[in-house]
Image (cartoon, coloured by chain):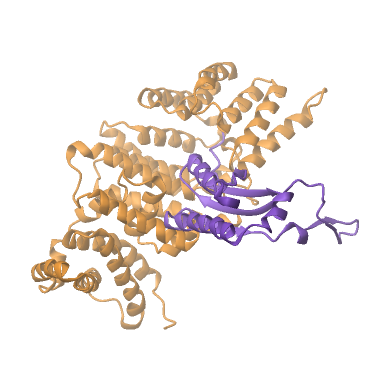
Amino acid sequence: MTDEVLDATSEHLLRELAPQVLGTVIRRFHDFAAAEDAVQEALVAAATQWPREGVPDNPRGWLIQVAARRMTDFLRSEGARRRREAEAVIQSSYLAPSADLEHELDQDDTLTLVFMCCHPSLTPSSAVALTLRAVGGLTTAEIAKACLVPEATMAQRISRAKNTIKASGVPFRLPTSQERTQRLRAVLHVLYLIFNEGYTSSGGPHLQRLELSREAIRLTRCVHILLPEDGEVAGLLALMLLTDARRLARTGPDGELIPLTKQDRTLWDQAEISEGVALLTAALSNGSIGLYQLQAAIAAVHDEAVRAEDTDWPQILALYELLKRISDNPMVILNHAIAAAMVHGPSKGLELLITLDSDTRIANHHRLDAVRAHLLEMAGDHQAAITHYRIAASRTTSIPERNYLITQAARLNESAPSPRTN
Amino acid sequence: MKYILLMAAPKAGFDTYRAWSEKDVQAHFAVLKDINKELSESGEFVATEGLAWPEQAKVVRAGKDGAPITDGMFPEAKEFLAGYWIVDVDSPERAYEVAARISGAPGPGGVPLSMPIEVRQIMTGKPDELP
């Protein structure tokens, strides 16, 4: 063992190169699971050799060569039948050294890899794990730590995901134009899940989860570079940046939640806001419209208000009207009701919530009660607001949120004239 | 989403368990071992532990000076926690499925014990954006 470790620049370089190298090796050897192992070994070799011997002149070629050598060893050990196949592959690629492989490398390999890791045949948790490993270049231990599960469990999850891909016979190629919209939606959803997994309370043991938000932004940026014309990719990246910009203001020193109206807006990250707004403006000027772009546009309106009372609620309401037309997600209806309440008063918002009581997807969700409580409080019906804050508190699965909701109920209860509720 | 599956057994259960045949004990643990193996292979396993028996349990309260006051387990308690599993699954239905497998582990004569397994979600949810 050596004490020397990779410097940050080299580590960053390795993370950037990992999906390119993996994509190339998969395309050449047609075995996702084995290629993934081989590339991981090449990355480990780089992490141990580069600090001693220096970063090679052609780091990508170096990694491909090491990974290809591992693949060859693997294929050679696979038995006689497999050996003949291996020899054929070796003849055509490996023996003509890395230059051959490397010259074929193009950016489509990375994109193809993203589509493969976010394949709809995988469960969301598997797709998240596989994407972080194969595209993000994170180690299994890092992913396990971020997802708060044991490393052995994460190793199994990744291994199963690879086997699922193998068993489903997904070819290593870009989706056809017919498949593309649906497949891209799956990719964006996985990236959004990764972001959301990290975008949480920054307190205590959850600190490392912030890394996942950064990783999601990095990966989405990478997909955006590969597909610059796609409005929804740009929209998702903008949404992440515009949401992440508020992260520091969103929680207090003990991890308690601070609602948008009470946040210290000087803590918002103006660089992220500017980048998000610029991305969104460019995407919208192309005439495209989609779920992520609209959500990003709403986030941008919030972010551009210097004070909470400056928020352009009519604009937000108009954006939710558009969103409602292209999405039947009950969360959209819920948020639309908040915007309507801010523009037309709480009774309008409460009226819009009634339809959700019969929607099984959300009727028992804490968020419906939390919003209803908020609007009832706005309307001055504090007793009913207390009831709904408490129902919401009993239904949420987030500790900071439960604390927040209980605090809201307590605040109203203590300021309420008798009879007091207990 | 993470769930804890709590296996509680009636006081009498601990007593009769001591009298199970070797074959029954082995069959019971073979099934639980299979379940653990399955959870590991599916990438859903987080943790499992069995607890020492109630005879050794103490109930502790803080005295006025903050010092622990220990007491034996109360004999009137009907049920005692025997062990737990923590799983990370994609749906509540999957957590119920695992709980049913545990509940169905065989008892004497290979008859499923049908122990009640309490399934509780662990608070790992993400807070929503608040208005």
Where the N terminus of chain A falls, by quadrant? bottom left
Q: Colour of chain B?
A: purple
Q: Is residue B122 left or right of residue A359?
A: right
Q: In x, y percent, where is residue A215? A: 40, 55
> Residue A323: where, in percent of width, then height?
39, 27
Q: Is residue A8 above or below residue A420?
A: below
- Count of marks overlaid on the render: 0
**Residue A319 horizontal side relative to residue A172, left or right:** right
Task: Name the spot of residue A118 as percent of width and height, x first.
Answer: 32, 48
* Tint applied to chain A in the drawing: orange
Q: Which residue is depicted at the point 41% across and 80% down?
A: A4
- For image coordinates 31% across by 82% down, the residue present is A53
Asked if residue A30 is positioned above or below residue A51 in the image, the reply reads above
Q: Nearer the viewer, residue A303 or A137?
A: A137
Q: Residue at x 69, y 61 (%)?
A: B52
Above-or-below relation of A191 to A157: above
> Which of A395 and A54 lies nearest the eye of the viewer?
A395
Instruction: Give the left or right position of residue A421, taking residue A265 as reference.
Output: right
